[in-house]
Image (cartoon, helix red, strand yellow):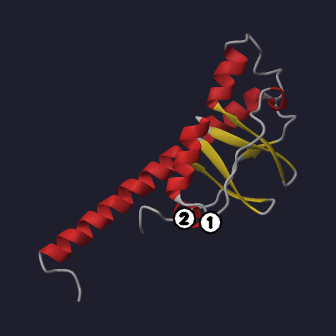
Amino acid sequence: MNITGTIDSLLNQKGTEIWSVDPQDTVFDAIKLMSDKNIGALLVMRGDDLVGIFSERDYTRKVILKGKSSKQTPVRDIISTPVITVEPGYTVEECMRIMTEHRIRHLPVLDGDRVVGIISIGDLVNWTISAQSNALNQMEDYITGKYPC
C-alpha cells in the first residue's frame, strides 16, 4: 500500500457496498437508512442511473433550516446535483484534492456509467494514515536490519 494508491485499491480493501434511495423516497426514509447504516451520505439512484447524492449536509441546510418536513419532502427536491464522481484509476491524492476544491465529503466511483462504490474523506484519511504507518515501519525495519534483502 502506498500513499498514492488508487481508488480501486482502496475499494478492494474497504468494500464496494452501496446504499441508495430512489428520488421519490422521502427525506425521512433516507435519514433513517443513513442512521441504520451509520453513514453520512446516500446515492440517489433511478434504477442503475446515478441522479444525485444526499448527505447530512443537504438535510441540515435544505430541510431543517428551510422549515420543510422530512416526512413529506421527496429526496429529489434537495439532492446535490450534478454529482462529482471519480473513476477507479484515480489516486487517493487526486480524490483528496477534488474533495477539498469542491468542499464535499463523498465521491461516487463510476466505471463507465456503472456505480462501483463510494468513498468518503474518512476513507481517504484512513488510507493515508495506514500507508504512512506502513512506510515508517518499512524504514524502521531497513534501518535496524530487519528489512529482507
Tell me if I can see residue 38 in this picture: no
Q: Amino acid at mark 1?
A: Gly
Crowdedness of circle 1 by 10 Å Cα count: few (<14), some, many (20+)?
few
Residue 90, located in which quarter of the rendered image? bottom right
Residue drawn 59% across the image and 66% down it: 8
Q: Pinpoint residue 143: horizontal percent, then vertical percent.
A: 14, 74
Q: From the image, tell me which residue sits under label 2.
A: 6
Residue 73, located in which quarter of the rendered image? top right
Q: Is residue 139 left or right of residue 40?
A: left
Q: Is residue 67 left or right of residue 129?
A: right
Q: Pinpoint residue 119: horizontal percent, then vertical percent.
A: 59, 51
Viewport quadrant of the C terminus: bottom left
Q: Amino acid at mark 2?
A: Thr
Q: Is residue 108 above or below residue 21?
A: below
Q: Is residue 24 left or right of residue 111?
A: right
Question: What's the CA distance linking mark 2 and mark 1?
Answer: 6 Å
Viewport quadrant of the N terminus: bottom left
Q: Of callouts 2 and 1, which one flags the residue occurring earlier in the amino acid sequence?
A: 2
Q: Pinpoint residue 43: horizontal percent, then vertical percent.
A: 73, 44
Residue 73 circle label:
none
Q: Pinpoint residue 134: horizontal percent, then vertical percent.
A: 31, 66
Labels 2 and 1 touching (C-beta < 8 A):
yes
Foreground of the two, 13 or 36? 13
